Image (cartoon, coloured by chain):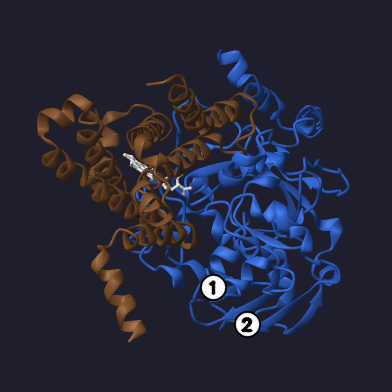
Chain colours: A brown, B blue
Amino acid sequence: MNARQTLKTSLLFSLCCLPLAALVWGVAANQLGANPTEALIRELGQWALRFLLITLTATPARRWLGWGFLLSYRRMLGLFGFFYGLLHLIGFIWFEHFFNWQELLEDILKRPFITLGMLALLLLVPLAVTSTRGAVRRLGFKTWQRLHRLLYLAVSAALVHFFLLVKADLLEPLIYLAVWVLLLVLRLPDRFFVLRWRSVSE
Amino acid sequence: MSKLLFGKQNEYQRAALPESAVTATHDYLNRRQFIQRWGMAGLALATTSLVTGTLEANQPSASLKSTSNSQYDTTEALTDYESVTTYNNYYEFGTGKSDPARHAHQLITDPWSVEIRGAAKQGSMGLDQLIDERDLERRIYRLRCVEGWSMVIPWIGIPLRKIIQRLEPDNSAKYVEFTTLADPQQMPGIRRNVLDWPYREGLTMAEAMNPLTLLAVGLYDEYLPKQNGAPLRLVVPWKYGFKSIKSIVGIDFTRQQPLTSWNKSNAQEYGFYSNVNPEVAHPRWSQARERRIGEDSFFTPKRETLMFNGYAEQVAHLYAGMDLRKHF
Ligand code: HEM
């Protein structure tokens, strides 16, 4: 890695840490509103989802815009998604259940939205574990790639998790859903877009 | 470290002693005012719910006189004025917890009249016809939101029973239905169909006549801030907060059980009664515990929720023999 690349990597790394820094500052300065624990859990959940979605923009960004630079940072972005998801879970265990493992387990088993959140996070574990270059080599690229398609499932589970926890106002999860659908559409094979284009021009 | 992180939280607790609380919040707010805005503007854009800290700090004006009715008062620490006035649900002004504080200034509360309908003296009544300020009482009640948080609020109001007696409902009146104003001009939240507007709530006649049930016009010794349901709201302390309907424009004495807004929106999750009950879980979360706003901090577990929010002595008889799992 040359110096420029190192600089870029550290810059992006710092950027990814900013939400966490803001939250830590928010706690220290008492700027998270009247219910800071709720704000923390929610922000961490949203940032987890955002990072997972950002990770998934890398491929479409290169394909449609020719921006290749994100591709080399996919691993970092995905790991940040996992990291924020983990903090989100820790926040939940700490603030909602205060480390009462019995209650926690009941919640995970009994409440579908918690079950799905847990599922989303668990699906990310094998991806995080196999995110090293060595793991790609050991698994073989094809297997590794197939395994990492679990990310689609994790994001879907997280989205359903979000929809299920909302009381009445679906606007926010709908915005995330729209982004998710767009990202999926942008990944459709060329054939799909070519056919479309032909049928329009004929 | 913990001093750095939680010093403010402790001040919250100290500020929240009953009686001295009003003055104590003043100092607290002055300290608070100098941090008005989030430094990191770009992030704040994305971190939507974080910007609650930017709301204008407001303070009670101590302008409303009342006599204290301590018979029903809790002696627990009051929730600080800023939390009470910047963190609540009032979907007519948006679904975020800080939306009411941000948008409710658009509400016009003067003149205000309440339409009385149904089996009683019907007609439109001005606020001063309905509320005789000499009768105002100060009551310190717990408020438990269905979402799992709670506050302790010094309300000012008149027991609803006193007002009902003057409206002389006849025997056919079995329920009281309340309606909130629904004006898209003043209430931006109304423009979206999150709930079926206007917001409606209801009580059985016995619940409405219970001495705890208050028609409030103020809190913390001032007229109700708009975000808290000015100029007139219900306070039913043994029920989940959404039963305590805000900015009332209609009172209807009915024979049939009113179709209340949250019940209509999701009958599996929100019953007509919606009494605070730690044993009956909301389908998506447990109701066994609650977080007391401003008091339960990062290092305290949530406290246990009490049956009927701690008012069993006053209200349990209303539900004698009822299956509270069924009539939740
Ligand atoms: C990668 C995995 C996960 C993602 C992406 C995720 C994402 C989210 C999002 C976007 C929200 C909504 C935040 C808001 O309303 O502003 C949320 C809320 C929540 N999540 Fe997760 N979540 C994940 C895993 C989990 C896990 C493992 C748990 C617990 C076992 C959990 C528990 C919760 C709870 C309790 C809330 C509601 C917080 C509240 O309303 O106060 N989540 N999550």
Give the Cα separation between the discs numbered 2 and 1.
36 Å
Q: Nearer the viewer, residue B266 or A184?
A: A184
Instruction: Find out if the beta carbon at label 2 lies less than 8 Å from the nearest ligand 1 atom.
Output: no
Q: Residue A31 location in percent, x, y? A: 64, 33
Q: In which quadrant of the rendered view does residue B161 lie?
A: bottom right
Which label was assigned to residue B170? 2
Q: Is residue B152 visible?
A: no
Specify the subunit that label 2 lies on: B
Frontmost residue, B9 versus B16: B9
Residue at the image position 55 percent from the left and 31 percent from the top: A23
> In terms of image quarters, where does ligand 1 lie?
top left
Q: Give the quarter of the figure containing the C terminus of chain B.
A: bottom left
Q: Chain of mark 1?
A: B
Q: Residues within 10 Å of mark 2 (few under 14, many from 20)?
A: few
Q: Classify B171 as above or below B194.
A: below
Instruction: Judge from the rendering whether residue A165 lies leftward or rightward of residue B103; answer left or right.
Output: left
Identify the residue at the far right of this view.
Answer: B63
Asked where in the image residue B165 lies, by quadrant, the reply is bottom right
Q: Position of residue B30 (x, y in %)?
A: 82, 30
Type of amino acid at the residue the image marks with label 1: Asn
Which residue type carries mark 2?
Asp
Q: What residue is pinned by disc 1?
A: B193
